[in-house]
Image (cartoon, grey):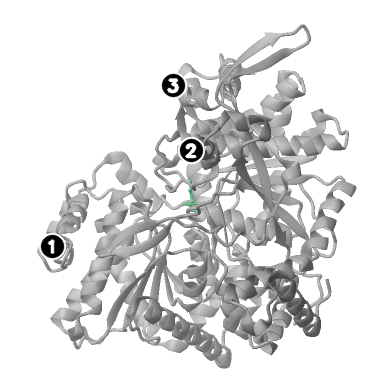
Amino acid sequence: MKITQERFVREFKKQLAEKFALDVKDAAPIELYQTLVSVVKSGYSEIWRNTWKSYVKNDQKQVYYFSIEFLPGRLLKSNLLNMGWYDVVDKGLKQMGLSLDKISESEVDMALGNGGLGRLASCFMDALASDGLPGNGNGIRYKYGLFKQKFVDGYQIELPNEWLTDGNNWAVARESKAVDVLMGGQVHLIDNGKYLEAIYEGADVIKAVPYDTGIVGYRNDHVNTMRLWDAQIPASEEVKYPTIEDRRRVEDLTSVLYPDDSNYEGRILRLKQEYFFTSAGIQSIIRHYKKYDRPLNEISEHIAIHINDTHPAMCVAEFMRILLDKEHMDWDEAWQQTVKTMSYTNHTIMAEALEKWPVEMLATVQPRILQIIQEIDRRYALELEGKKDHDFIERTRIIKDGMVKMAHLAIIGSHSTNGVAKLHTELLENDVLRDFYELYPERFNNKTNGITVRRWLQVANPELSKTIDQAIGTAWRFDAKKLHELEKHVGDKKLLEKIGRAKLDNKKKLAAFIKEDTGIEVSPHAIFDVQIKRLHAYKRQLLNLLHIVKLYLDLKDDPNRDVEPRVFIFGAKAAPSYHYAKTIIKCINEVANMINNDKTINDKLKVVFLENYGVSLAEKIIPAADVGEQISTATKEASGTSNMKLMLNGALTVATLDGANIEIKDHVGEDNIFIFGLTKDEVLEYEKNHHYYAAEYYNSNPVIKRVLDAFVDGTIPNIEVEGHEIYDSLLRVNDEYFVLRDFASYVQAQEAVSEAYKDKQNWNKMCLINIANAGYFSADDTVEKYAKEIWDIKPNSTEMRGKAKDVY
Ligand code: 6GP
């Protein structure tokens, strides 16, 4: 729909009157928001339909991205931007005395994920649409998203996140596309003379209802679909569930997002969720495929299915189940199609996150799926007999010691396994998945993560975006690699000043938010030093905290010390069952209290832990950051993506040589990043030879001793229990993540940061180089590589990014 300011205002008023019988001046923020959503939706619904029709018309190969998490955040501004409506709507609302920023605050974040993996899935959705690629999301419509985090006395409290209370305004329920998912009961195979028939007895039938959300491409008349499934009771089964409690038992299947992103304890509900959205998705894909009378033994030429981490690994078995039991294909042909269709991404090497399920549990959830996995496993072992030794086969088979290894299922059942940064892929190939790499070298590949520059720069940071436009034009908005042209202007003092000013404006805004949210006063002229990510021991928020305590103790010794004032900003949720992570949260909060209330240090140091970190909070913090902390123990962070978002917004990175930090360093050069700490080889060496003794560092380094003692000698108040726990984890349990080993080198890197900040012009130059090189981490390019090298899909139009008219 072509939009003008006048037309938008007319349409908005009309829909407000129709929907709520209200005038603009009488409407509440939520009513204004809902009206705006419906205007926006009517603006893209025809394109949405046309996109879908063109896939069918051109018989285009499509990819279905299966992910148990999606973290889209708010959609309003990002949709407006992608439609090319942003400025017109902004002005139109102003004309009516309204503000887009305020209206947008009424949107509840869609937080259907825990962290990196879920946000990556959403960046990829945006990129697929913006690349004009035929790509669909497939996931779960949790009634409760990721918990809302509050701090009470410094402790994390989790509250339910009822994001659906005002209805979800973007999704469309498609009852007519519902499918039945069978769970539980028993299965018998009967030879009926023609084929083996699977007879189910006593299984529950659950109706999976899809809710579709349009994913709008950037200025390219292209709208894809993210399909999220809801569990309901089919009409035919209603009598089986006479009471409200009975009904709830079934419907609860899609109630809560499993709240651990790395400690996956064996919970049957989680396994049921995995089967539920996998089965619903696969059934609907095959049903759609068959509608156009195409032969099933060519299905892999028409569709690709992506398994985002192992949670949807049952795709392999479910696809086989349908081809075998419903379509009566023979095993070998079905297997060939399955392997060609599936591809898999690994997102972590942390052992506790590599999913394993007990065989009995799978038998309870879906006995036929277990049978199929057993058969895949049997054939796998048989195939290797005589070619590989017994140990190799036992190590790599899917079922071992009564446990089903989901990563093995995903690797054996797919044609592609990728890691998410060069180092991570290297570790998969040479270490974690070494055996499989030996077996299937051609299946392994790297796809370094990427982010959508639209949400993380254009929407989140209009100040910087405008500055960039003035320097190099607007082509970067279509092709982020063009940001590189900024490097030509590295000597342009005016531009450097403008970059500095945009940052200062953003810091003022964040300072105002911090004041409103926490009551803490911070100076926008201090260094804003940011660590935002899930709370996990390997991400080492603790290392950051130890350094803060060191700075504080230094200031206590000499309050007039000449230091660059700093504000340390944290955002992080801990998994509710992850005790140690919660202990760290409590300690950060108590250190913050101690420092922020100490008048003697002349406001040279502040610590702010913002509650309820998520996509929308990230959009406020990232544009205001001077320094980004990417300080995981080398080898542990698969890639990281906040590192990319922060550099894109002109923050300088303090980093270990881990995950994508290495590639960031390669692009910006060593002079424009602060590298410290153990390397991969050093970490691996320590882990192999067990010759690390954390206590040695405590005993020989008086700074470390003093900082750690502060946790147990009453210096830091209110952490009698937690302080000891931290102390013991480092000194008695021997510091699993080498915090003390890296401490001195970290302090040095931080001193270099303070020194560099003194020369503002040079600092801004370093920021510019970071911004200029962030385009290499655009999800548009990452997804293009997946499209070419893994999925074999093509864009459906030539009117793609870089070609659309520049109307800014
Ligand atoms: C995360 C990784 O920890 C992070 O390094 C990476 O950037 C992100 O995935 C996207 O690839 N992993 C998860 O969120 C997770 O749940 C099972 O892994």
Q: Which residue is situated farthest in the left direction here?
A: 713
Where residue 505 sits: x, y (%)?
50, 87
- Which disc, if any, is residue 245? 2
Q: Looking at the picture, which amino acid does disc 1 mark? A: Asp
The mark closer to the camera, 1 or 2, is 2
Say which amino acid is labelled 3.
Gly
Left or right, residue 284 beside residue 504: right
Label 2 C-beta lies within 8 Å of the nearest ligand 1 atom: no
The percent position of residue 679, horizontal first and vertical second, equals 38, 54
Q: What element carries label 2?
A: helix
Q: Name the residue under label 1.
A: 709
Near mark 2 (Cα within 10 A), the count class, few <14, some 14-19 or many ≥20, is few
Which badge, 3 or 2, is on the more N-terminal residue?
Answer: 2
Q: How far apart are marks 1 and 2 (CA)?
A: 53 Å
Amino acid type, mark 2: Glu
**Rendered view: 32 above or below 544:** below
Does the residue at mark 1 contact the one at mark 2 (Cβ under 8 Å)?
Answer: no
For marks 3 and 2, give the CA distance. 33 Å
Mark 1 or 3, which is nearer the eye? 3
For residue 401, what is the image quadrant?
top left
Element type where label 1 sits in the image: helix
The disc, 1 or 3, on the residue closer to the chain's N-terminal end is 3
- Label 1 crowd bin: few (<14), some (14–19), many (20+), radius 10 Å: some
Please name whichever residue, 51 or 659, is drawn nearer the observer in this view of the structure. 51
**Dot 3: element:** loop
- x%, y% of residue 56? 86, 47
Q: Up-down: is 234 above or below 159?
A: above
Q: Could one spot residue 442 in this view of the protein?
A: no
**Residue at image mark 3:** 402
